Amino acid sequence: HDDLLSPLHDKREPYVEIAEQPKQRGMRFRYKCEGRSAGSIPGEHSTDNSRTYPSIQIMNYVGRGRVLITLVTKSEPFKPHPHDLVGKDCREGFYEADFGPDRRVLCFQNLGIQCVRRREVKEAILFRIQRCLNPFNVPQEQLLQIEDYDLNVVRLCFQVFLPDEHGTFTRALPPVISNPIYDNRAPNTAELKICRINKNTGSVKGGDEIFLLCDKVQKDDIEVRFFTHNWEAKGSFSQADVHRQVAIVFRTPAYCQTNISEPMTVKMQLRRPSDQEVSEPMEFRYLPDERGTVHLQRALHLSII
């Protein structure tokens, strides 16, 4: 019985698995000249009360190893990204550290993203070519197509090296890449957030003017969505009603049933059509149309008479 299992066991090669993805939005990429810490990339399950961080696990393996983390582009072929990883155990734009057999899950608490300007991209890529930081072996001529680099988004690339018979870290496991991480500074990829509205109630017939303050949005790529589990409609506004990327003046849509007799609570959120990203919803209350209610009551009264 053991003999039958052993060939199967031999095939169970070690591999890298991401235990906690990085949070995709809400992180600001920092320029070196800002002279401040780039912060730490939080994990996708991170909250204000409970911080988590990107982490990986080496499956089918217990022992020593070395982990190398670099930044790569969002889209295939995954090219080395010109932005730098900074923080503890980072140098020259990448992270590298050894680990021992006691560490089953490797958690990275001090990874920050330092961005380069468009004019610095070529120099940064030439540096990566020189250092052989090219985990997916993309041909050099493709790496030097400088205009193709999207500076608003990166991915983490995790490479793990295990010791060979001489104890040297030469056994490379297949590289693994994270979900994309978007720069919160860029309005086309930033986290959407409603900061404040001047009122959260309005007529069931719609048409109320609302002033909404928000984090940066693009005037040609934003909607105000009203919805319940079985209905949705959009606020009405033009690009001229989006002020300096941080305020929207719009009119509310009519609710699907205009003859309600009690206030009706729905949800309202920002939505970006290009990538379908949405903000946290907030409540909006539709109020019955008083004139309609009076007419209805009068009609009911007459019919009873």
Image (tube, rainbow, N blue to C red):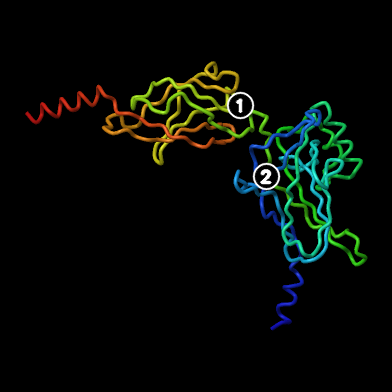
Left or right of 153? Residue 215 is left
Q: Are marks 2 and 1 in contact (CB under 8 Å)?
A: no
Above or below, 287 against 99 in this view is above
| Along the line of sight, the residue nearer the viewer: 245 or 88 | 88
| Residue at image mark 2 | 42
Estimate the x, y position of residue 255 in percent, counting from the top left. Answer: 36, 30
The residue to which callout 1 is attached is: 216
Please tell me in which quadrant of the rendered image residue 31 appears: top right
Lateral position of residue 206 relative to residue 114, left or right: left
Nearer-the-camera pick, 76 or 80? 80
Q: How many marks?
A: 2
In the image, farthest residue toward the top? 240
Q: Is residue 126 above or below residue 50?
A: above
Closer to the N terminus: mark 2 or mark 1?
A: 2
Give, as a three-letter code, the residue at label 1.
Answer: Lys
Question: Would you identify the image quadrant in which residue 112 lies?
Answer: top right
The structure residue drawn at horizontal position 70% and vertical position 47%, both measured from the top left corner, is 178
